[in-house]
Image (spheres, helix red, strand yellow):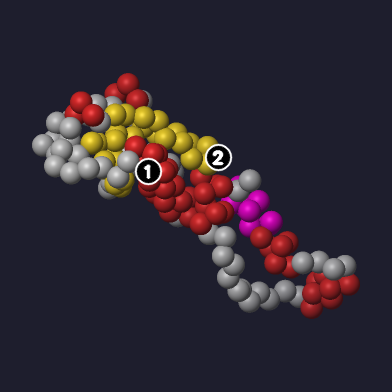
Amino acid sequence: MFLVYPAVFHKCIDEDGYFITFPDFEGASQADTENECIYMAQDFLGINLYYMLIDKEEFPKPTSIKDVVIEDDGYTNVEESFISLVGIDVQKYAKEIGKETVRKNITIPSYLNEMGKNNNINFSQLLTEALEREFEIE
């Protein structure tokens, strides 16, 4: 699931670097260079959407980029700031940051355990695939 949101890249007046905000999310990120801005913006967006995915919250509808303005807040060099769309594959991001495995004890009927062992079933893989289907993760 690839999502795109507008971001404002505020060029700082008093110091080198940028701070990055999204009209559709609270908080901000920061970066030293324009190249770092895109990486940090994607990471900020990914983290916010990751926790919404985990909590099964509805993702906010993206604000139209035409409606986003750079405000003169006293900290931003408006002329050197810019607006851009930032996109991220939420499920891919979630799989990447949540790729460590955790051990879970499960209880199943003994006949299923025996049938699984006799058929070389990888129970962890089967449970993972079933949970991904349940949560509609591609």
The residue depicted at 31 percent of the width and 29 percent of the height is 83
From the viewer's side, name the closer residue of 62 and 106: 62
- According to the picture, the residue beneath numbered tag 1 turns out to be 36
**Which of the marked residues, 2 or 1, is nearer the chain's N terminus?**
2
From where the camera sits, is residue 56 visible? Answer: no
The residue at 13%/35% (across/down) is 73
Q: Which residue is mark 2?
A: 1
Q: Position of residue 103 (x, y in %)?
A: 60, 74
Please tell me the numbered disc located at residue 48: none
Per the image, is 1 magenta? no
Kindly report the secondary structure that dominates the magenta region of the rendered protein: helix
**Label 2 to label 1: alpha-carbon separation:** 24 Å
Residue 79 placement (x, y as % from top left): 20, 26
The structure residue drawn at horizontal position 42% and vertical position 51%, both measured from the top left corner, is: 47
Q: Nearer the viewer, mark 2 or mark 1?
A: 1
The answer to whether residue 84 is left or right of residue 102 is left
| Residue 64 is at least partly visible in this image | yes
Binning the other alpha carbons within 10 Å of mark 2 as few (below 14), some (14 to 19) or many (20 upward) gives few
Residue 31: percent from left, percent from top? 31, 45
Task: Residue 118 in the image: state x and y as whole percent.
Answer: 88, 72
Q: Quadrant of residue 122 in the image?
A: bottom right
Magenta range = 129-136
Say which element carries label 1. Answer: helix
* Image vertical order of residue 87 relative to residue 92, above or below: above
Asked if the residue at tag 1 contacts the one at tag 2, i.e. Cβ–Cβ closer than 8 Å, the answer is no
* Secondary structure found at label 2: loop
The N terminus is located in which quarter? top right
Residue at the farthest top position: 66
